[in-house]
Image: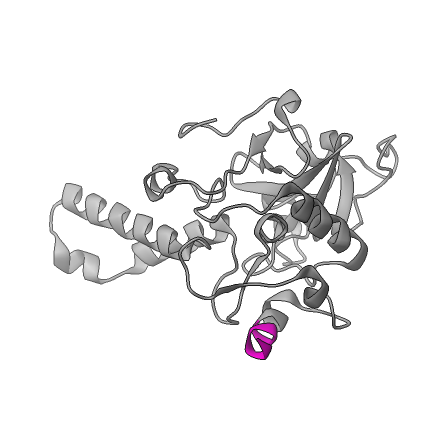
């Protein structure tokens, strides 16, 4: 592990680790919690419908459902291609042919910024392993609300299991570093002040990268102010829970 890559071997895994695997030419990564015995608990919309357009783009761009078809189901997991929500899969199904990476917690701001791609680490510290395993198992039985690519996705699920932190406002993106990095990149591109700050290409690139880094850092759950610690029992207290909206209500109750 290090600045260049978070790739690890299976032998290095420990129960409670937050792991991920890149999908579709490194466009998107799928996240989950390794719980031991070769199993991973993760959150998915299922059937390649993560972005929810109802078109072929869902399958091509953001597929995190296990790779086995209904004709050749996994001997251990069965057919999970149409299963959504919080599910348990074997490590092979979770990786879907990709490499294994570990998400890092409690990193320094310098290390965080050195990882130019979001969704690989956070400044927030992780909770004890027993808390992580308890949350993931509890949510496997009770669900994690509705899947939302920006506010409640697989990375959000894994980060919550590791930290117990949820966003307490209903207007911002979730805890996902991937979503934050895409938003920071988009904000940098459309920011009109750039053209007034510099006229050279080198200066423009430097200012743009600086804005991107600041945007990523300010969106990390380790520094942002709109996050709160929410016990998992309270998270699923109401039927039909939608996690992003309900979290704001929980914060007000506190």
Q: What is the x, y in percent for residue 176?
A: 52, 52
227 lies left or right of 136: left
Evaluate whether residue 48 shows in this view. Answer: no
143 is higher (above) or lower (below) than 58? below
Evaluate whether residue 54 shows in this view. Answer: yes
Q: What is the x, y in percent for residue 16?
A: 66, 39
Location of the C terminus by quadrant is bottom right
Q: In this rendered view, identify the residue nearer to me: 63 or 216.
A: 216
Magenta span: chief secondary structure: helix
What sort of colour scheme is used for the picture? one colour
Residue at image coords 53%, 69%: 168
Residue at the far bottom in the pictured view: 253
The residue stretch that appears in magenta: 248-254
Whether the magenta-drawn stretch holds residue 250 is answered as yes
Total tally of numbered discs in the picture:
0
Q: In this rendered view, identify the residue nearer to me: 195 or 133.
A: 133
Residue at image coords 65%, 41%: 129
Residue at image coords 84%, 37%: 77
Q: What is the x, y in percent for residue 95?
A: 67, 32
Residue at image coords 45%, 44%: 118
Whether the magenta-drawn stretch holds residue 136 is answered as no
Q: What is the x, y in percent for residue 156?
A: 58, 53
128 is higher (above) or lower (below) than 224? above
Residue at the far left in the pictured view: 199
- Answer with the quarter of the image where residue 64 lies: top right
- Answer with the quarter of the image where residue 97 lies: top right
């Amino acid at each position: 592990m290090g600045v260049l890559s978070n790739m690890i071997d299976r032998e290095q895994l420990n129960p409670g680790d937050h792991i991920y695997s890149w999908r579709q030419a490194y466009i998107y990564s799928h996240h989950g919690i390794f719980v031991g015995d070769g199993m991973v608990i993760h959150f998915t919309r299922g059937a390649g419908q993560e972005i929810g357009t109802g078109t072929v783009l869902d399958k091509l761009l953001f597929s995190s459902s296990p790779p086995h078809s209904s004709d050749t189901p996994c001997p251990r997991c069965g057919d999970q291609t149409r299963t959504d929500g919080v599910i348990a899969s074997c490590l092979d199904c979770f990786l879907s042919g990709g490499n294994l990476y570990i998400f890092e917690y409690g990193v320094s701001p310098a290390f965080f910024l050195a990882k130019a791609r979001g969704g690989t680490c956070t400044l927030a510290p992780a909770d004890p392993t027993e808390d992580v395993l308890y949350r993931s198992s509890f949510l496997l039985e009770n669900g994690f609300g509705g899947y939302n690519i920006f506010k409640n996705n697989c990375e959000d699920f894994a980060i919550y299991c590791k930290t117990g932190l949820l966003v307490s406002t209903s207007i911002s993106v979730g805890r996902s570093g991937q979503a934050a990095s895409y938003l920071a990149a988009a904000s940098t591109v459309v920011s009109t002040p750039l053209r007034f700050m510099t006229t050279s290409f080198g200066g423009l690139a430097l200012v743009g990268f600086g804005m991107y880094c600041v945007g990523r850092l300010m969106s990390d759950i380790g520094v942002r102010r709109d996050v709160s610690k929410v016990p998992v029992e309270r998270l699923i207290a109401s039927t039909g829970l939608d996690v992003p909206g309900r979290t704001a209500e929980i914060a007000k109750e506190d």
